[in-house]
Amino acid sequence: MVVADTIRSAINAGQPREDIYLVSDGSNDWTVDLAYLMLDDGHVIAQPQSGKGVAIRSGLQYFDIAWRYEWVHIADADGVFGPNYFGELTKRLNTKFAAATGHLQSIKAGWISKYRTFEYTLGLEVMRRIQAFLGTIPVIPGATCIYRTDILRHLDFNAESLTEDMDLTIQIHRKKLGPIAFIPQAKAFTQDPKDFHDYFKQVMRWYRGAWQVMLRHKIGFRPQRVDGYMLWMVAEELILLAELTILPILAWWGQNYGPVSLMFLTDLIIFFGITVWSAGVNKRADVISGFPFFYILRFVNLFAFFKAWYEIVVQHKFRSTTGWAVAGRRYRIATEAVGNN
């Protein structure tokens, strides 16, 4: 069972067993029974499927976390932690921060993970550090999510969003609860979708949730730095869309393909250079072999971004917040692979 790997990983990463709690949100397998065997009495609860946000709120209330602890770490049941993960957090957490996030990496497992390694390396080694410096971290990922417990009463865990981690992060910005820390020394590892079908379902959920959050919190209409940063993220997608549609059409219309060819060649060189760099940073030469497929997934992400925009902003669809089915998606985590990342 995946949850067993996660619990064992947390203990091996420095988290005492007596401080680990589990909420089962509608599990229909052996998750709860296994958790009862691995954790202390009174540390496991089960509820009908209600969505991750409600499950988190239920656990915080039932286990009286805010009264008993200064910090709470919330994690998904399909990831593992690097050696001394919690020790690294403990050394660097400071009460001047309202929340914190560690360094997220992809577990080596198939061609999707190669692309995610590329994305996470660029997103965390570069962009996350910039976000932390500017105070504009837009999402604390569910796999490595830490809150100072005294801010929990200010957060709405019933938010109408498919991406509760982003919604809670934006709430911290909107309510001015404090800065968010990025702690790259604390490395967590997450599993990625096994195939393209699962990958597309996941990115659609992420983008739909992102548009829900942007509408709910009126991103772009408040004088906060996170608004400017998220608008820039949208602008990047618009620029990429223009590069792939408007510029080629103009080149065809004017029968002048030189500038467009140079643009694509430059993009290809930069993209490949970042791929080689991410392979070196993660000591994963196999990432380079996935490069030809990266462009496909890059276009898929662009399509998913605007498809989600149309569904959420124009059609007002997807009001359900119970998340997405995981049956058949999760697989046993080879925890020894973490040491090789």
Image (cartoon, grey):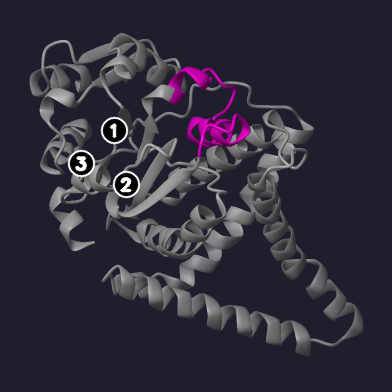
| Residue extent of the magenta highlight | 151-178
Can you tell which quarter of the image residue 257 is in? bottom right
In the image, residue 31 lies in the stretch drawn in magenta: no
Placement of 3 over or under 150, stated as above or below: below
Residue neighbourhood size for the residue with mark 2, other residues' Cα within 10 Å, grouped as few (<14), some (14–19), many (≥20): many
In this rendering, the answer to whether 318 lies above or below 180 is above
Residue at the outermost right position: 254
Q: Nearer the viewer, mark 2 or mark 3?
A: 2
Residue drawn at x 44%, y 22% is: 152
Nearest to the observer: residue 320 or residue 226? 226
Residue 201 visible in rendering: yes
> On the picture, is 334 further left or further right than 265?
left
In the rendered image, residue 322, in percent from the top left (x then y), is placed at 49, 21
Residue 51 shows in the view: no
Image location of residue 176, percent across then percent down:
58, 33
Picture disc at residue 77: 1
The CA distance from mark 2 to mark 3 is 12 Å
Question: CA–CA distance between discs 1 and 3?
Answer: 11 Å
Going from the N terminus, do you reach mark 1 or mark 3 first?
Answer: 1
**Tag of residue 16:** none
Front position in the image: 42 or 328: 42
Residue plotted at (68% across, 31% down) = 217
> Whole-percent x and y of residue 73?
31, 33
Q: CA distance from mark 2 to mark 1?
A: 9 Å
Q: Residue at x 42, y 37 (%)?
A: 99
Q: Are marks 2 and 3 in contact (CB under 8 Å)?
A: no
Counting other residues with Cα less than 10 Å from the Cα at mark 3, is it few (<14), some (14-19), or many (20 or more)? few
Question: Would you place residue 325 above or below residue 91 in this image?
Answer: above
Q: Image check: 338 left or right of 115? A: left
Q: Which residue is mark 3?
A: 332
Question: Label 2 belongs to which residue?
Answer: 190
Query: Residue at left 45%, top 41%?
Result: 140
